[in-house]
Amino acid sequence: MDARGWSEIVFTIAVTVALAFPLGLYMARVWQGQSTWLDPVLRPVEGLLYKSFGVKADKSQNWLSYTFAMLAFSIASFLVLYLILRFQNLLPMNPQGFPGTSPDLAFNTAISFITNTNWQSYTPEATLSAFSQMAGLTSHNFLSAAAGIAMAAAVARAFAANRGEGLGNFWVDLTRISLYILLPISIVIALAYVALGEPQTLVAHASAVGVEGGKQTIALYPTASQEAIKQLGTNGGGIFNANSAHPFENPNALTNFIEEVSMNVLGYACVIAFGVVALARKEARALVAVMAVFILAASAIVYWAETQPAPAMHAVHAATAVNMEGKEVRFGAPSTAVWTAFTTGASDGGVNAMHDSYMPLAGGVAMFMIQLGEIVPGGVGSGLYGMVVMALIAVFVAGLMVGRTPEYLGKKIEAREVKFAMLAVLILPLSILGFAAAAAVIPVALKALENSGPHGLSEILYAYSSATGNNGSAFAGLSANVPYWNSTLGIAMLMGRFGYVVPVLAMAGSIAAKPKLEPTAGTLPTHGPLFVSLLIGVILIMAGLQFFPAQALGPIVEHFQVLQTVAAR
Amino acid sequence: MPLNALPNGALTLLGRIPQSSSKPEEERMTDLLYLAGGVAVLLLFAAYAVLLKRA
C-alpha cells in the first residue's frame, strides 16, 4: 500500500461521483420528456418508433400495466435471443462457422442478457459469431439497461405523484432512455476506445507468429462498441473470455479508468435524476453519499487484503508486497481493488482480474458487495430502486423507535409498502442461499467444482450471488457450462431481477396513490449525516444477518487458514 | 440415503435436469422445454403481480 495507490482509488471514485451530477440532471430531463440538445436529431426517430410500434406516447400506465409491459418485453427478448443463439449457424456473420449453442447454454445466456446479468458460462471467442455478439448480446446490453433505468424512472414518478396512479409509459421510457442516454454516450465512449487501441472490426481473426516461431490465430470482434455499453449499462459480459483483463477489451491504464468510471456513473446519475423528479435533491445526495461510502470502504479493504503476504509467495520465499496472482501487471493492485468494488457494487460483473485468485477476505468483500443487493450504486436503475427500498426500511425502523408513522419524501410509509419492500429484499437470500445449499449436496452440481472445502463453498456461493444479484462476474474455479448450472443459474437470474422488481413496482403504485405531504417538525430528516449513518447500518445489518453465516463457512474460514499457513512458515 | 435420492423432493428434481442430447428430435424437445420453462417463469411473475395487486 502506498499514497499513490490510495490517491488513485479516491480520485476514481471522486471523478465518477462528480460526473454523475450533470449526467443525472440530463437524465431527469429525459425521464420527464423535456427537450434536450439532441432533439433535432432524435425526436423524429423517436416519433417514428412510436408510430411503427403503435405506442400511445401520452398514455400513462398504472403500476400493473407498467409491470405487464416490462414482462411482455422480457418474454419477447428471451425468445428472440434464445433462437439467435441456437441457430447462429444459419445466420450471417459467422465466418468461423460456429454451430448453434446447446439448449441449456442458450437458455442461460438469453436470460443472462435480458436480466442485465451477463453471466457467461461459455468462452465467447470460441462459441459465438459476430452476429450473435452484435444483434443478440450487444442490443440486449442496451435494452436491458434501458429497462432497468425505466423502472427507476417509474419509482421516481411515484414519489412525485400526489394521489396519482400513473407511473409513466414503459415503452416511452425504454425508447427515450435508449435513444437519448445510452446510445449517444456509448458512441462517444466507443470512439474513445478505438482511439486508445481497442479493435472495432468484422474481420474474424488476425494471424501472428510468436517469439518462439509458433503461429497464432487471434480472435477479433467489434470490441470497442460492445465494451462501451458493457460498462455503461452495467452489463459486464465480455466479448472475450478474459473480459477486461484481455488487452483488446482493456488495453491500458486510460481505458481501465474510463471503464471504471462508466460502469458506476449512470448508477449515481439515476439517483440524482430521482432527486430532481421526486423533488428531493438533498435526499438524493444522501443516497449518493451512502453508496460512495460503501464503494470507498470496499476498495480500501480489497487494496489492503491484496497487499498482504500470500501463502503461495511465502512458500517460494518470494519477496513481494502484492498478491499479483490473477492480476494484470499493467493495472496493479490499486486499480484492481477499485475496479473490484465498482464492478461488484454496480451489478456490472466485468472483471480486470480473476476474483478467485484474491486473498480470501478480498474475495469475501467482492461477494458481500453483491449480497448487499446491488445497490451501491447498483445496476443502472436497479441500484436506485434497491436503495429506495432500503431507505423505506430505514425510516420504518426509525419510526418504530420513536413511535411515529414513518414518512419518506412526503409520503407516509405504511404496512403495505413495508411488506412489498420486504418481499423484494427476501428474494435475495431465498435464491442465493436456497440454490447454494442445494448445489452443496447434489453430486451433479459438485462435479463442476474444481476446489473443495471453504474455497469450493465460496465458488458456489459467489455463483448464485452473482446470478441473483444480476452481477454476472464469476469467481472462476467452476465449470458452469453444464445443464444443471446453466438451468439453476438462469432461474436465479430471473428471481433476482423480476422477483425483486415486481414488488418494488407494486410498492411504487401504492406510494403514487398517496397524497404528497409537507414535512412537519416531527418528520425524520432524510438528508443529514444521521440518516446516512442509519441507512448504512440498516444495509449492513440486513445483509449481515442474511449472509454472514454462509460467508463464515467460506471466505472467512479460508482467511484464518491463510493466517495459519503464513504463521507456520 | 443421499439427499438427491429422496423421492419427489425438490432436490431430486434439481438433480435430474436432463443432459443435452445430440439427437435432433431430442434436442427439439429440450429446446421446447427450455423455451416453455423460461416463458412460464416470466408468466409466473405476471401472476405474482396480479396477486400483489389484489393483496
Image: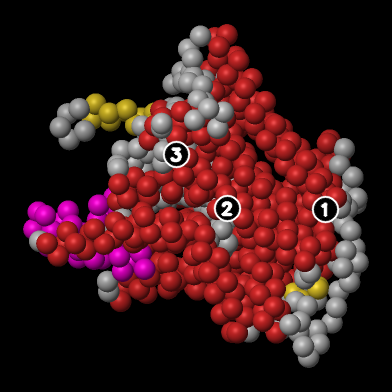
Secondary structure, mark 3, is: helix
Q: Is residue A89 left or right of residue A318?
A: right
Marks 1 and 2 on same chain: no
Q: Is residue A294 magenta?
A: no
Q: CA distance from mark 1 to mark 2?
A: 22 Å
Q: Is residue A553 above or below residue A567?
A: above
Secondary structure, mark 2, is: helix
Q: Callout 1: residue from which chain?
A: B
User: For this rendering, which residue is in front, A230 or A388?
Assistant: A388
Instruction: Determine the residue positioned at 87% across, 57% down.
Output: A166
Secondary structure, mark 1, is: loop
Q: Quadrant of residue A20?
A: bottom right
> Which segment is the magenta one?
A301-329
Task: Tell me residue A553's x, y (percent).
Answer: 36, 55
- Decide: few, some or many residues near mark 3? Use Cα within 10 Å; few <14, some 14-19, many ≥20: many
User: As shown in the figure, which amino acid type bears the numbered disc 2?
Assistant: Leu
Q: Quadrant of residue A445?
A: top left
Give the residue pinned by disc 1: B55
- Decide: few, some or many residues near mark 2? Use Cα within 10 Å; few <14, some 14-19, many ≥20: many
Task: Tell me residue B43's x, y (percent).
Answer: 74, 36
User: As shown in the figure, which amino acid type bears the numbered disc 1?
Assistant: Ala
Give the residue pinned by disc 2: A428
Residue A40 in view here:
no
Task: Tell me residue B14's x, y (percent).
Answer: 52, 31
Q: Is residue A273 left or right of residue B9?
A: right
Q: Callout 3: residue from which chain?
A: A
Q: Is residue A313 magenta?
A: yes
Give the residue pinned by disc 3: A439
Q: Callout 2: residue from which chain?
A: A
Q: Is residue A366 above or below residue A102?
A: below
Q: Is residue A233 left or right of residue A213?
A: right
Residue A556 in view here:
yes
